[in-house]
Amino acid sequence: MKIAAAKIKEMIAAKRITFADQFPEIGARIYGQKERLNYGGDNPKPDPEYGAKLTLSWELDLWGNLRWANEAGIATYMQSVEARRGLQLTLVAEVAAAYYELCALDRRLTIVQQTLDARREGVRLAKLRYDGGLTSETSYNQALVELARTETLLPSLERQIRIKENDLSLLLGEYPGYIPRGLSLSQQHLPDALPVGLPSALLERRPDMRQAELKLREVNAKVGVAYTDLFPKISLTGNFGAESEELGDLLKSPAWFLAGDLLQPIFAMGKNKAKLKAAKARYEQEVYSYQKSVIGAFKEVNDAIITIRKAKEIRFAQERLEAASKKYLQLAELQYINGVTNYIDVLDAQRGYLDAQISLNNAVLDELLSVVYLYKVLGDGYSVND
């Protein structure tokens, strides 16, 4: 963001340069010199000369060359402003997405830790039943395998959490470190439905759309510059001031000089006309590019709306699956304790419940990320007043 802000300062200075070109340039020149002429005498005679002059340089903008250049400079400057807005929008979206991903990793770690507790309890029960002669050693070893397999998930998740915290620190412009947590995924507010009839005018505020429009204006202004190059340029130069051989007579000898130059392009092998054709071709390219940007923006918004709707449906389905898997696990454990089923059925139920919990966690994350994506493609989200 600081780099983008410094870029805007640079473009402000460049814009002022193109604006100032429309006005006369006035400078000052003060000089003095002294020489001694010795013709063989004892006291050579000094010959001083002093002068003070104002210089004037002004190109008459009869055909709008400088005005078109100034308009192009303004469009270029505004593109840097929109680029900064686009960067800020992207940073907000990336920070939100990274935080949601971090919360999802926290939730996944909690699920694995709870599963580990269940695995340890399963190992304890399996050992008691094996020691009591109720089950074979196979069931006990199966419990140990599942416990070890679940324990391997912890280091990977902890590594992912630390890396995600470092990613967030970088986005925030800070050194790597712990990221404080706010609301969990389940506490995040999600809209029940999108407002009906969101206006397409929302897309006009997207920074990339504004940049594309300003780029079109810039190229159009450069066409104007190329067109005016076909006509003559008139510039005025002048000197106003005084000069004298004696300092005391400096102000007594005013002098002024004014001249005008006319540059008329007559024969340049069609170079200026070729420049105009090239500028028009670039403008045509930008027109097509702008049209492509508009179509792309509508596509992105439509994709985002579809993604939100389908992500919500997937989350509802995963919630039903998670509830059913939990119920199935409870029944399997109860039947195993009563000796109705084998321990392998309990392990299958535990795996299914773990997968259902993780899938539900991913579904909630995907729904939140789809909202972040919609915020970005709309150019700053939306409100009920939109």
Image (cartoon, rainbow, N blue to C red):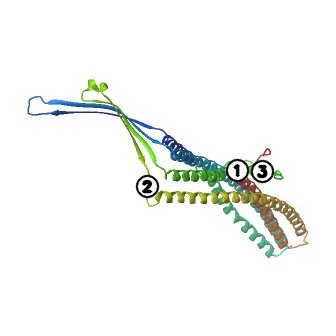
Q: Amino acid at mark 2?
A: Ile
Q: Amino acid at mark 3?
A: Pro
Choose top left, top right, bottom left or bottom right for residue 29.
top left
Marks 2 and 3, how far apart in space? 54 Å
Q: The residue tagged with tag 2: helix, strand or loop?
A: loop
> Which numbered circle lies on residue 199?
3
> Which numbered circle lies on residue 266?
2
The residue drawn where x is 81% and y is 73% is: 139
- Give the x, y percent position of residue 189: 79, 49
Q: Is residue 131 visible?
A: no
> Which numbered circle lies on residue 204?
1
Front-most of residues 299 and 377: 299
10 Å crowding of disc 1: few (<14), some (14-19), many (20+): some
Judge whether 81 appears above or below 270 on screen: above
- Give the x, y percent position of residue 276: 52, 57
Q: Earlier in the sequence, mark 2 or mark 1?
A: 1
Marks 2 and 1, how far apart in space? 45 Å
Marks 1 and 3, how far apart in space? 10 Å
Q: Earlier in the sequence, mark 2 or mark 3?
A: 3
Front-most of residues 66 and 334: 66
